[in-house]
Image (tube, helix red, strand yellow):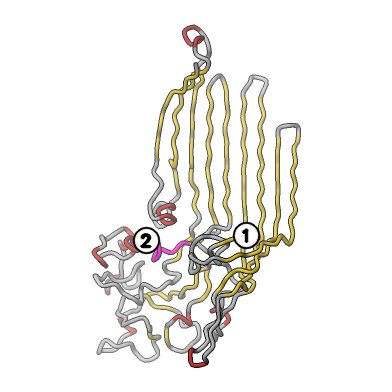
């Protein structure tokens, strides 16, 4: 039994951040292997299936005129499946060259198996059966063109109409999923992954020889989706709210480049139609990063240095190399600010 403050896997965020309730985690299946070979290779694998029940959630909405009201109840259920694995190898040659390497990988996928929800006219509108935090978004269909409007500036007959506000040439155009001729929340479908990654990997390599040592750690994150409209609004919406023009809008829609534009028309006004969650704003959130590199040298205890028990000179770099997401640093899209790239050098002495 455990305590949690959210429907979302026990994290302290979401609509129930201030709730006080309990949930029960039950391991349905678990299988693990630990392996050691020749005192050089160590490997572990752990496969799991876990079910969390009793998650607090809001009941379905009941019209007020019925006189009925319901309290929040512990009725939600989530199933988590995945594995964790690690591999470590260490050896030394006859010339005393030591080297080692390792890798870790974790995979976890969840599914909302039970959730109280109001009736929805289309199956894709429900959360049950999908991932926690999975994006629901409109499917983009390019931009409204001049040909979509009549001589009076109104949408021509047969062109889908947005319920999110008046549209103009150069605004985002969306697919009418249910065929009712209108673009609204009924056209938002589950897409891609959630912001929380399903797969994380880490790799560590290093060696030691003749007093020198080198250690490198890199990380890879995948099966993750980020939304530029959520995490980089100031970057993707130049001029609106006084934002600067950025590289994202280096090819905006204009009548002259209507067929080659890669971003909506520029405007100083916040456009509600363009600001809807849509696949146009979703990006593959995977990234690769060199987390740290350290190079050091341990001075031999000879001559003057005999009086020192240990003396090591080193240089260390953190967050040195990173892949980009839409020209932005990945952590900037996760936490609102990028992790700093740092390089340090020092001396450690033991007397």
Task: State the residue position of label 2.
Answer: 232
Label 2: which secondary element? loop
Q: Residue furthest top?
A: 303
Q: Is residue 68 above or below residue 130?
A: below
Q: Residue sitting at 74 percent across and 37 percent down?
A: 36
Q: Horizontal and vertical percent for residue 56? A: 58, 70
Q: Is residue 346 above or below residue 23?
A: above
Q: Horizontal and vertical percent for residue 26? A: 70, 62
Q: Residue sitting at 62 percent across and 26 percent down?
A: 98
Marks 2 and 1 in Cβ contact (< 8 Å): no
Mark 2 or 1: in front is 1
Task: State the residue position of label 1.
Answer: 2
Mark number for residue 96?
none
Magenta-tinted stretch:
226-232
Label 1: which secondary element? strand
Quarter placement of the N terminus: bottom right
Left/right of residue 129 with respect to residue 216 in the rendered view: right
Which of 289/338 is in front? 338
Q: Residues within 10 Å of mark 2 (few under 14, many from 20)?
A: some
Left/right of residue 195 with respect to residue 109 in the rendered view: left
Q: Horizontal and vertical percent for residue 114? A: 63, 74
The verdict on residue 231 being magenta is yes
């Amino acid at each position: 039994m455990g305590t949690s403050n959210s429907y979302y896997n026990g994290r302290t965020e979401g609509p129930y951040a201030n709730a006080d309730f309990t949930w029960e985690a039950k391991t349905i299946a678990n299988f693990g292997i630990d392996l050691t070979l020749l005192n050089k290779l160590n490997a572990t694998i752990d496969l799991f299936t876990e079910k969390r029940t009793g998650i607090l959630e809001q009941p379905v909405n009941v019209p007020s005129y019925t006189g009925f009201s319901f309290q929040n109840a512990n009725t939600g259920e989530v199933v988590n499946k995945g594995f964790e694995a690690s591999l470590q190898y260490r050896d030394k040659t006859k010339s005393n060259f030591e080297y080692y390497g390792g890798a870790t990988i974790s995979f976890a996928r969840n599914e909302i198996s039970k959730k109280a929800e109001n009736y929805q006219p289309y199956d894709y509108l429900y959360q049950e059966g999908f991932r926690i935090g999975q994006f629901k978004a409109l499917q983009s269909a390019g931009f409204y063109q001049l040909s979509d409007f009549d001589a009076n500036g109104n949408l021509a007959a047969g062109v889908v109409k947005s319920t999110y506000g008046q549209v103009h040439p150069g605004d985002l155009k969306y697919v009418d999923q249910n065929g009712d001729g209108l673009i609204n929340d009924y056209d938002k479908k589950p897409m891609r992954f959630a912001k929380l990654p399903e797969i994380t990997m880490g790799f560590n390599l290093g060696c030691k020889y003749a007093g020198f040592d080198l250690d490198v750690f890199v990380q890879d994150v995948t099966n993750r989706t980020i939304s530029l409209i959520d995490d980089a609004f100031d970057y993707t919406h130049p001029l609106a709210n006084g934002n600067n023009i950025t590289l994202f809008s280096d090819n905006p829609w204009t009548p002259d480049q209507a067929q080659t534009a890669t971003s909506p028309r520029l405007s100083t006004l916040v456009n509600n139609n363009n600001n809807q969650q849509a696949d146009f704003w979703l990006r593959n959130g995977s990234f690769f990063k060199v987390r740290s590199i350290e190079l050091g040298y341990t001075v031999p205890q000879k001559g003057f240095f005999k009086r020192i028990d240990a003396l090591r000179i080193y240089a260390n770099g953190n967050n040195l190399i990173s892949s980009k997401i839409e020209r932005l640093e990945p952590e900037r899209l996760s936490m609102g600010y990028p992790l700093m790239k740092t390089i340090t050098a020092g001396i450690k002495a033991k007397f």
